[in-house]
Image (cartoon, rainbow, N blue to C red):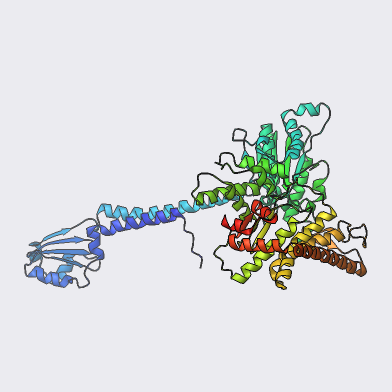
Amino acid sequence: MKTPNIPANWIRGGIIVIVLIAIVLAIPPLQERFTASADEPTLAEIATQVMDGQVEKITVSGDEVRAELTDGRVLLTHKEGNISIYEAFTLLGVPAETLQEVDVTVASTSAMSGLQQLVLTIVPLIVIGWFALHILRSMRSGQDQAMTFGRSRAKMINVDQPVVTFDDVAGAEESKQELREIVEFLRDPDKFQRLGARIPKGVLMIGPPGTGKTLLARAVAGEAGVPFMSISGSEFVEMFVGVGASRVRDLFTKAKHLAPCIVFVDEIDAVGRARGTGLGGGHDEREQTLNQILVEMDGFDNDTNIIVIAATNRSDVLDPALMRPGRFDRKVHINRPDVKGREAILAVHVKGKPLGPDVNLQTLAKLTPGFAGADLENLVNEAAIISAQRNMSFIGAKEMQDAMEKIIAGPELRSRVVNAKEREVIAYHEAGHAVVMYHLEYSDPVHKITIIPRGAAGGYTMSLPESMDSGLRLREQLEEMIVGLLGGRAAEDLHYNQITTGASNDLERTTAIAHAMVTKYGMSKKLGLRVYGEEQHELFFGRSMGGTRDYSEDAARMIDEEVQVIINQCYERAKSILRENDYKLNALAQALLEVETIDREDFEALMQGAPAAVLTAD
């Protein structure tokens, strides 16, 4: 059961009421009234004591009768009806002469003092007034919230706040060069308008997550010295119809008042997906919001000086009307950085952090192919955390290496119990990868081999690219990639004449490479120079449904056969290399069983004939 969330001001008000009531109950005269004894004497008994001469004084207050006896006792009782005390005693047989001998005092007020009456009168009024005030405030707050529901929630960054410039963005030189035109227009729009030039109204930044799209947009605003309004595409859309369109109108109204300025919409695919692909047809809330964005961008004049920058990693699902000239007519592709870009990004993120003398950013950049800017920032942060856990005063190369491996493969699982047989199989599997890769012409050099489990992997072999990142691959390079991946399975097959499930990931990657060689890269002589299977660009609920099969059953059978031929040939080549270097395979596997991890220097020494005893001695 969910615990109700009671507002703090309600609790404070309740405490105040309880305290006031406690004060009232603590006043002695009133307390006597509430705590009177259940066996109090009757008025007839007091009348008898009056006639016996035992009563010295009687005080009447309202219906309360207080009798003070000659022996010092006090009796408290109540009379009934509206008759006076004299009439009551007369009816009970007390002579008037006897009653005159007693000091009888009739109070003109009730038993409670003036202060008590005041408190008991004001306290309910205070409580009622407090609740009424709270209800009125709640109603006013609800009205204010309803009035602001359709307003834009964009975050504002003014020029007087700390700014980001292009100097803070590393690894995206080409993208920065394209955006410098936007900066120049915002600084000096007359220069372009005199020649009749029209600056792009919208700039769409396309790139994978973490590549710095938001940072680049802020850098444009910082370089131009103009206000920067930032909002996420998902913040436009609500369950109430018309709210998204209202927020778009409010956003652009504010932008026009701040012009020149930059409006940044992050993850625009949340609201800008192609229309007609959702359950709501042409009238759902998201499409109304998109329509309003299109209208607002069309309404810009040439001298408005508002630049809309949007970011997405799914440009394929955006509505064509959003991509046409006059809206987002400038597209800036921000790709993952190459090795030089990664080195520059690492240099930015290590500023202000104490680095050990053995840290080489160039080597670290080579070890992180495919890492985006956010990944590299996380890498440096993880290395700092590991260094702090080891009570170090600086970040060393080993900590950087451990952080990188933790991000890629997961944390070390030294506590996981691995039996001797399984450990030996893992050692031969990883040794098979390393030995095969060492004897291939196009394979990257082996950087590290370990049999320490990380994540789901029992061990792994890491290679270090020597050349710069390149998108071009030779057929021989792809084949040797497959040979290296199959080296682990080949080692198990040769040494144990058995196979295990340890090569599942290797086989998955192997199949993907071989299939792409046949169906995408045209590297099969039998099937010729064509692509088999086209990507389906039709959208359903904003997502691609995958690829279409544009070939016959005979072609499908030939594709399977060609893929299998490539894999079989590469597997036989891997086994052939291991047969020729069986002594190296055994020596490396035994060294791994002894030291668990071998780096590049020791591995190459072993491959060149150094005895394994030298490695285990280190």
Left or right for 295, reference 462: right
Reply above or below: 355 against 580.
above
Q: Residue at x 86, y 56 (%)?
A: 521
Point out residue 609 in the picture as x, y percentages from the top left corner: 68, 56
Task: Return the x and y of residue 172 as percentages of the image width and height.
Answer: 72, 41
Name the spot of residue 53 as percent of width and height, x first.
6, 67
Q: Position of residue 387 (x, y in %)?
A: 53, 49
566 on left or right of 68: right
Q: Nearer the viewer, residue 500 or 531?
A: 500
Say which of 434 and 128 sits in front.
434
**In the image, is 392 to the left or to the right of 323?**
left
Quadrant, the C terminus: bottom right
Viewer-nearest residue: 327 or 350: 350
Badge count: 0
The image quadrant that residue 542 belongs to is bottom right
Q: Quadrant of residue 98?
A: bottom left
Q: Would you say residue 480 is visible in this rendering?
A: yes
Q: Is residue 574 above or below residue 252?
A: below
Is there any visible trace of residue 144 in the rendered image?
no
Left or right of 227: which side holds 97? Answer: left
